[in-house]
Structure formats: structure tokens, C-alpha cells
Image: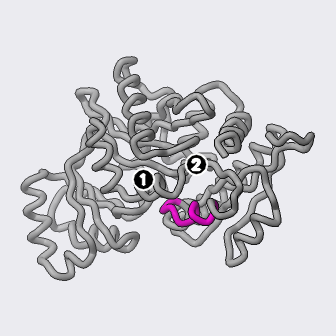
Amino acid sequence: MTASSEPLHVLVLAGGISHERDVSVRGGARLAEAIRHAGAQATVLEPNATLFDAITSAAPDVIWPVLHGASGEDGALRDVLELTGIPYVGSDPEAARLAWDKSTAKTLARRAGVATPDAAVFPRETFSELDATSVLGALAERLGLPLVLKPVKGGSAQGVSIITELDALPRALVDAYSYSDGLVVERHIEGTEVAVTIVDTGDGPQALPIVEISPVRGRYTYEARYTAGETDFYVPARLADDMAASVAQAAVTVHQTLGMREFSRIDFIVDAEGVPWFIDANVMPGVTETSLAPLAIHGTGRDEGEVYLDIARAAIARG
């Protein structure tokens, strides 16, 4: 907190133009309310052409970007925030770029000893020059069905398909490429889907209680993520103690390997043998009423707003 008697001022950036705009708006409003309830000042600002001047005019103690999708998580926004000289919550531009690219994040996680499903990456231009059906058919023979097709850059399960037969590939390609110019084709892992929120308030990254995700119908789609009642959550996850410890350690390893900072979320699928398979790293976890990070915070028994203020203060102390 600043040395003056004035309450901490957190500038929340929310909105943007990505496919996840609505999630950002809802999360930003909810974050600001939690911060105010905890006794600090919070202002919500939507990025536009005057963003830089608006930030410097507001002169907050710290910035909290709650922008999802490319506009908030690909590193570019953080490059702008670096120029303001004002502390901000979360990963720096380099870490954001590493985490945002699923292929890069998977490669780095594997090098750090964390299991991640075998996969191949195909830029859009590859399939404009090659027989996509034949290529993917050969990949299916090598990896086996089902296959997961997902945008190489993106979030909230948008553009993700699970393919159990090759006839479904053309539509899956269209869905994935509508969100990104690159495609990850990944071996499907059967198991329990879990999310680990990581918080670092100055004493090193700590894993919060693991959240287990159990969609009521089918898989954890965009709609299942952000529609109340569409998914059951268990906090802590229904994992044996040794298994939970393994998942938490893997999450901290990924967080550190990618260079992430005060707040992140690392997603896994835990198979029948208890192996946590790294799926995705989230630069800025969602904070809506159905998001996973708030559920993890509630699992600690602490007030959500107080945790957010601790995170904000850690960002200020880091400078």
C-alpha cells in the first residue's frame, strides 16, 4: 500500500475486443466490487485508443488487467503497461507470450519434467498447401482416437473439439481456425479435469486448493464454464492426498518454468494412474461468479477481496 493514508487504488482493466469480452466485463466488475468490499478503491477502465493517457491520468497504485483472449493475454497489453511505469498484477510480456502459445507452453513444461499429451502443430498455411484429411488421418493412426483439436492460441475452450471419428475433422478444423491461425492436434487423455490456481504474495508461488471440474452434460465447453448450473465443482478435488500433492507440485513447476508471477491458473487432466497431464496455462485467471480461481480462494476459507488485495500489494512490492 502507498505510504499515504489514502486507500489503495486498483485500476481494473476489463472489456476489450476479444471473443471473451463478456467474461472480462463480468469478471472486472466482480473483482472491483470485491476489492472495494475489502476496503480499497477500485476503478474499472475499458481499453480504447486513449488507454495510455487514461492510465497515467488515473495514477493508480497498481493495475489489474482482467482482459482475456489475445487482447489481454498475448503479451502486447503488458508491453504497454510496462511503459506506464505503474506496477501491474500478473505475468510480464515474455511469460505471457510463452503461456499464450499452447505449443510453446507444452514444450517448456515437458522439458521441466511435467507430462503433457503428445501433439502436433499445424499453421493454417500448412493445410492450405497439403491434404489436411490425409495428414490428420496419419496423425490419428500415430496418436490414436479420440484426438483433441484446439487453437494454438486461445482460451475458455473456444474452438476446441474432441474427435472420435475422422469424418468430424473438417468441421473441427473450421472451428479451431476461426479462433487462431495455428492448430494443436493432441492425444486425448481420459481422466479427471482439474485446475490449480497459483498465488504468489511474496513468499513464492503457492497452489490453492485444487478445483475438480465435472460438467453436468458432456465436456467443459465455453457455455459450461460461464453458465451457472452447467458444471459441478469440487473443492478440494476428490483426489488422494499424494495425488493432489503431485498435481500441485506440477502446477507450481509450470508456473515457474513459464516465468509467471502473482496470479495464474494451470489446468491438468489426471489419468487413472494418478498422472497429471498438463493441458493449459492461464496468464490471467477469470474471476466471474463461475470462474475457477474464486472457487479455489473460497476453498482456503479466506475473504476473496482480501486475497486480491494481497496479490495487488505483492505486485506493488515487486515494482
Element at label 1 = helix
Q: Say which residue label 1 marks.
A: 99
- Residue 252 x, y percent position in the rendering: 43, 34
Say which residue appears at 72% left-offset and 76% top-offset: 50
**Secondary structure, magenta segment, majority class:** helix
Q: Residue visible at 50% across and 30% down?
A: 207
In this rendering, the answer to whether 148 lies above or below 254 is below
Residue 58 locus on image (x, y percent): 82, 62
* Vertical placement of residue 108 versus 96, above or below: above
Using the rendered view, name the quadrant where residue 216 is placed.
top left
- Residue ID for mark 2: 90
Tell me the amino acid under the disc marked 2: Gly
The mark nearer the N terminus, 2 or 1, is: 2
The residue most toward the bottom is: 129
- Magenta residues span 73-81
Q: Label 1 amino acid?
A: Ala
Query: Where residue 291 sits: x, y (%)?
Result: 56, 46
